[in-house]
Amino acid sequence: TGEVAGVSVHATGDFIVSASADKTWALWDLTIGKCRKIVSDPAVNAGYSSASFHPDGLILGTGTSDSMCRVWDVKTQQNVVSFKAHTGSSVSSLSFSENGYYLSTTGNDGFKVWDLRKVAKQGAQAAPVKHLSALGEEANHAVFDYSGTYLACAGAKAVQVFHTKTWSEVLKLPEAHTATVSSVKFGPDAKHLVTCGKDRAVKYFA
C-alpha cells in the first residue's frame, strides 16, 4: 500500500521482488503476472528503501529507512541476518558482487562494502571491509560490474569507479550530470557506464 522503493529481477528472469515503504516486500511471478507472496516481519520497524537479489537467486538483500540491512532466505522468506549498515540515513542502494561474497550498501555517510562470509558470523556486530567517502557530501547509488572487478559510486553530480582489489580510483566524472546523479550501471564487460540524474538526463559513457 506504500510507495515502492526498490525492485530487483531474479537471476532466472522469472521473478521480481518489490520492496515498499509500507514495511513489506513482495515476490512476483512474471510467468503468470501475479504476486506469489507478500512478506512482513514485526522486527522491521521502518519502510524499505532498497532491495537486491543475490546472484544465485537464493537470498535477498533489503535496506530500510532506519539504516538497517537485512538478508533473507527467498525460499522460506525468513530473515537470516540483520545489521546496521549506515548512520542516520536510509540504505539507498544495495549491490551484490557476482561471486556473491560481497555486498555494497549506500547511505548518507558514504559507500560501504561488506564481506557476507564475515557478516554471517558477526551478525549485528558486522563491520564493513571498505568504507568509501560520499561524493560532494552525497552518496546515492553504488553497483558492482558483472565480474565484481569494479565498483561504481554515484553522489552529487559525480561518478567514481574503483578497482575492488586495490580500491584505487580508475575513473572519476566530477560533472557527470548538471544535477544529482541518482543511478549508475555498467554495460557488458564494464566497457561503458550508463547514468541517470535529476537533470532528467540519461547518459552513456564509453
Image (tube, rainbow, N blue to C red):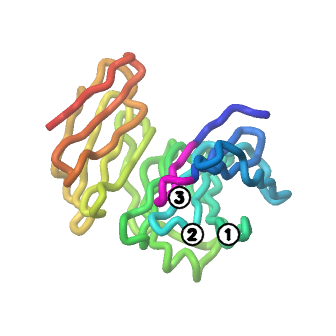
Calculate the distance from the C-alpha at mark 3 to the C-alpha at mark 1. Answer: 12 Å
> Above or below — where is 105 with respect to 47?
below
Q: Are marks 3 and 1 in contact (CB under 8 Å)?
A: no
Q: Secondary structure at mark 1?
A: loop
Q: Residue 53, which numbered label?
A: 3
- In this view, the residue in front, 145 or 182, is 145
Q: Which amino acid type is shown beneath numbered disc 2?
A: Leu
Q: Secondary structure at mark 3?
A: strand
Q: Is residue 9 magenta?
A: yes
Question: Could you tell whether 90 is left or right of 198 in the image?
Answer: right
Outermost front residue: 32
Give the image location of residue 160, x and y in percent.
26, 43
Q: Nearer the viewer, mark 3 or mark 1?
A: 1
> Above or below — where is 41 with respect to 116?
above
Q: Earlier in the sequence, mark 2 or mark 1?
A: 2
Q: Is residue 77 magenta?
A: no
